[in-house]
Image (cartoon, grey):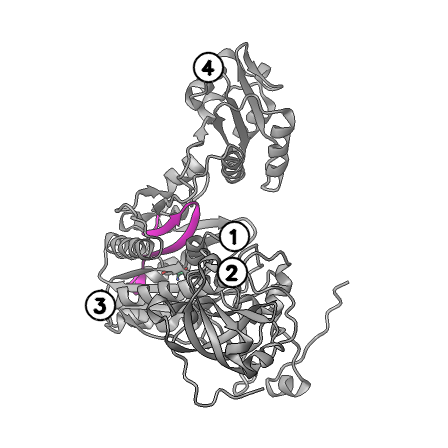
Amino acid sequence: MEELGSWKRTCYCTEVGKQDLGKEVYLMGWVNSYRDHGGVIFIDLRDRTGLIQVVFNPVFAGTAHDKANMLRNEWVIAVQGEVRARPQDMINTKLPTGGIEVWVKELRILNRSLAVPFAIEDEIKINEELRLTYRYLDLRRPEMQKKIITRHRVVKLIRDYFDQHGFYEIETPFLTKSTPEGARDYLVPSRLNPGKFYALPQSPQLFKQLLMVAGYDRYFQVVRCMRDEDLRADRQPEFTQLDVEMSFPRPEDIYELMEEMLAKVWKEIMGLEIPRPFPKMTWDEAMDKYGCDRPDTRYGLLLKNLSDIFPNTEYRFFKQAISEGGIIKGLNAPGCASWSRKDTDDLTYALKAYGAKGLTVIRYQEEGLAGPVAKYLNADEQKLMIERLDAKVGDVMMLMGDKVSVTNEAMNQLRQMIAKKMKLVPENKFNFLWVTDFPLVEWSETDKRWKSTHHPFTSPRPEDLEKLESEPGSVKAVAYDVVLNGVEIGGGSIRIHRPEIQERVFHMLGISDEEAKIKFGFLLDAFRFGAPPHGGIALGIDRLMQILAGGNSIRDCIAFPKTQAGSDLMVNAPNEVSEDQLKELHLKIIKEDLS
Ligand code: ASP
């Protein structure tokens, strides 16, 4: 092996061009491939910008040629050589540097490499575990480098944007106290305070609010948040969020701020114009038409509430749904009457995972309505249903009656499945949407109490304040989510800034004065010292990057992600710690019998 010595890189591989013909260059990087053509050795040298061909001609390169014989893929080298035009018949139009090559005079071999476990190229078919175990090799692949570098660009753009809009980036603590965002905390034992724990932040929510009380007026941070949730596909235990807070804002100010920023990102990264303002939809409307609070508006297949059509129905399932306070919803799949029984059975089966007991499928054929259920529906019901769903001959109507939550969720899933099956989801279309007026709280059947839809610091709509104690379920929040193509990419709210309202909300959530004092006493105190009205939002950067990259996996947009089981396969975390470490932290591990 040799040292770099006094060699200084002239430029990156792909920066060498026609303008350099005849010039001497120093290039450094990895051996991407090696070919020996009758004694002349050709190497594709790779750095983070791409490839360039370097040539070891025995006549020209002398001893460098002899050394080049030893090279293997992924060895690290530096070359000194002359830029030459390639012979006409050797031009590679696929490479940006395909018209030139570097004739090496001197070679320095800086390091070798073992045979790599997978090729450093884009088209690889290997399992993700191997990629994650050798993440530093995976990250060498051009497609991964592109994603990680694009992420840098996006974050830089965001930082510049907020700076230009008068926002300060202020860091908030990682070792802190629980802020409820609806997930479990990651805890860190305190060595200096036996038996006590820090919580890693689920978000900087309370700190950013306190920065408003402190008069900073406009705050943002690109910040890591940690939530100990059961990891669904594409969730990461630690993720990055763009966190924003403003004093004296109207929701419209936050919409405008974020819309302009997102439009800028799309323009600069994708070269696309995003129409503004983004459309807005209330939560009620989203649930009614789409059965979910993050609708994908790129295609139709809207849900229709049909409950009023079937008050006296003979059809057992609908009758039962209505008598139990549920709803009946339907959608019309145009031109799908020809779907086979198997097609619709597959859908019904898939919906079981979402709690659906069944799906009523009615084909609208030339001869009338077909399907086992049609005969239970009287003429009026049939007519009204067809009208409401705007069904035509050749269509198929799909209906479901169940509890409100089950019907909405299952019909939402059905709508997405049908859209995919019918290929209705356009590519390269970006539908942004604000969903507004969320319910302040939701009833938790498991805990038998009201829980915040967002978090307990969200402001109720002023006009709903009087219902806070009497009808919490009907109180709407000044809260908004920004949704893109059916994915929630961010959310926020105007906050409560008066202590008496915050206390009322805590009460309604079943948080006693004592508990509130222990957990959030500092916030209530702060609100007593001139807290301005304030509000903000947070945007998930990982998810945003995934959408921008058009990728399937959020992990591809994070340099060092965790698996679905929450492990880092490269460093092997989490891992066991020594008895000494445990002792120092005043901890004992109780081995559970998990059998
Ligand atoms: N703290 C919220 C979250 O992390 C965002 C916000 O309300 O601004 O989801």
Find disc 3 in the rendering and name its residue. Answer: 166
Mark 1 → mark 4, Cα distance in angstroms: 43 Å
Three-letter residue code for mark 3: Gly
Mark yes or no: residue 528 visible.
Answer: no
> Looking at the image, is mark 1 or mark 4 nearer the viewer?
1
The reply, left or right, for residue 559 in relation to residue 436 is right
> Looking at the image, is mark 3 or mark 2 nearer the viewer?
2
Q: Are marks 2 and 1 in contact (CB under 8 Å)?
A: yes
Find disc 4 in the rendering and name its residue. Answer: 383
Local crowd size for mark 4, using a 10 Å CA cut-off: few (<14), some (14–19), many (≥20):
few
Mark 4 → mark 2, Cα distance in angstroms: 51 Å
Three-letter residue code for mark 1: Asn
Local crowd size for mark 3, using a 10 Å CA cut-off: few (<14), some (14–19), many (≥20):
few
The label shown at residue 263 is none
**In which quarter of the view is residue 529 placed?**
bottom left
**In which quarter of the view is residue 49 placed?**
bottom left
Q: Quadrant of the N terminus?
A: bottom right
- Work out whether mark 3 precedes mark 4 in sequence or the reverse, and give the earlier one: 3
The percent position of residue 353, horizontal first and vertical second, equals: 61, 42
Mark yes or no: residue 586 visible.
Answer: yes
The reply, left or right, for residue 588 in relation to residue 263 is right
Viewer-closest of 218 and 17? 17
